[in-house]
Image (spheres, rainbow, N blue to C red):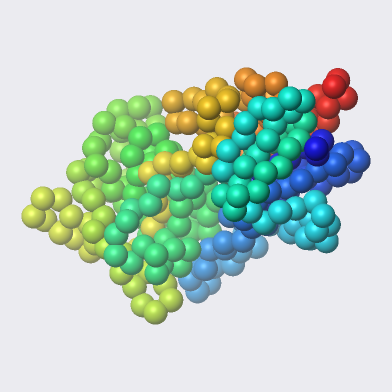
């Protein structure tokens, strides 16, 4: 039986694994890959450089290299379900293997809701992105589109309105614009709200998206933009422990300030939790906290 199993190999999971190993714990990290979403970089148009944005990629790569070196501490498998057993927990993977540990850290992340329209797969991260908060500073004086609803869409469009020349917000309903942020967004001179429109297609050249087709009933428009941000929602990968821990209304794992869940011995970190902001640097800090919290828990056993 391991001391600790860590589910997920993104920023939170990798950080937790490195911290736990430094505490001399017997750790097993279970993930189909190492690096998570940090391995997917936005391909930028001409005259835009990545150095303008502060990211945690470099830090994550250092943690990733340590885990790659320690082959005994990782299994490239898909964690499917965690069940309580005497003295701890048992993880079953989709590959059919079982691993046991005294404690578990869940850092499985979250997936963005997709548009499911023609061109989306081709232009993903090539003029089509899913995190305005990460890339907004790159698009100063550019034309951008935000496809979103609710607070996430409004917040993303408002952030872009501070830097972009023109922002198109495509929303199925304008109800979210009745909030304080929504009213501020509507008052912005460089924002055009396309209420009731939906995206029909992403269009572009061989390597980069150039425009989006939006439609409302029988009306159709083509918007020429430098980038389109899809800000519909994030789906947390909380299924392996959903039957054991408390989730919020969006099925994110509820954690306290020390990354403990409602179930003793299960901790969580990163985008799968209800912690504020889906950012690499935030996930790194949360992963470190979860490992330290799990270490203290194991000292009590």
Of residues 298 and 15, the one nearer the viewer is 298
Q: Position of residue 5 (x, y in %)?
A: 73, 40
Of residues 7 and 283, the one nearer the viewer is 7
Instruction: Please tell me which residue is depicted at 25% across the width and 36% down the height of the picture.
Output: 174
Q: Position of residue 61 (x, y in %)?
A: 74, 59
Instruction: Please tell me which residue is depicted at 91% across the width and 41% down the height of the picture.
Output: 24
Of residues 66 and 177, the one nearer the viewer is 66
| Rendered-image quadrant of the C terminus | top right
Instruction: Please tell me which residue is depicted at 24% across the width and 37% down the height of the picture.
Output: 173
- Left or right, 231 with respect to 280, comes to left
Of residues 236 and 233, the one nearer the viewer is 236
**Number of on-image labels:** 0
- Answer above or below: position of 254 versus 39: above
Residue 154 occupies quadrant: top left
- Left or right, 170 with respect to 216, comes to right
- Answer above or below: position of 249 versus 5: above
- Left or right, 152 with respect to 63, comes to left
Report the residue that reaches farthest toward the left: 218
Residue 287 occupies quadrant: top right
- Answer above or below: position of 255 versus 55: above
Q: Position of residue 166 (x, y in %)?
A: 35, 55
- Left or right, 23 with respect to 187, comes to right
Q: Is residue 252 visible?
A: yes
Report the residue that reaches farthest toward the bottom: 206
Q: Is residue 279 visible?
A: no
Residue 71 occupies quadrant: bottom right
Instruction: Please tell me which residue is depicted at 36% across the width and 77% down the height of the picture.
Output: 205
| Rendered-image quadrant of the N terminus | top right
């Amino acid at each position: 039986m391991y001391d600790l199993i860590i589910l997920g190999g993104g920023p939170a999971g990798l950080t937790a694994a490195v911290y736990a190993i430094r505490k001399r714990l017997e750790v097993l990290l279970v993930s189909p890959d190492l690096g998570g979403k940090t391995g997917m970089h936005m391909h930028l148009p001409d005259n835009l450089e990545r150095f303008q944005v502060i990211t945690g990629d470099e830090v994550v790569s250092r943690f990733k290299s340590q885990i790659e070196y320690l082959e005994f501490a990782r299994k490239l498998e898909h964690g499917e379900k965690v069940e309580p057993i005497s003295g701890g927990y048992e993880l079953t993977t989709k590959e059919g293997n079982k691993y046991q540990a005294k404690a578990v850290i869940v850092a499985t992340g979250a997936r963005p809701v997709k548009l499911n329209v023609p061109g989306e797969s081709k232009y993903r991260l090539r003029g089509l992105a899913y995190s305005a908060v990460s890339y907004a500073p790159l698009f100063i004086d550019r034309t951008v589109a935000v496809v979103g609803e609710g607070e996430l869409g409004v917040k993303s469009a408002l952030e872009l309105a501070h830097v972009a020349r023109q922002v198109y917000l495509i929303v199925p309903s304008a109800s979210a614009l009745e909030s304080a942020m929504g009213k501020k967004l509507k008052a912005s001179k460089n924002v055009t709200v396309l209420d009731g429109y939906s995206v029909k297609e992403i269009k572009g050249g061989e390597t980069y998206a150039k425009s989006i087709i939006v439609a409302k009933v029988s009306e159709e428009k083509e918007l020429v933009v430098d980038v389109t941000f899809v800000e519909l929602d994030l789906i947390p990968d909380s299924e392996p422990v959903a039957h054991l821990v408390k989730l919020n209304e969006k099925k994110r794992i509820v954690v306290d300030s020390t990354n403990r869940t409602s179930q003793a011995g299960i901790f969580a970190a990163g985008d799968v939790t209800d912690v504020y902001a889906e950012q690499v640097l935030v996930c790194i800090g949360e992963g470190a906290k979860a490992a330290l919290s799990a270490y203290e828990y194991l000292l009590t056993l």
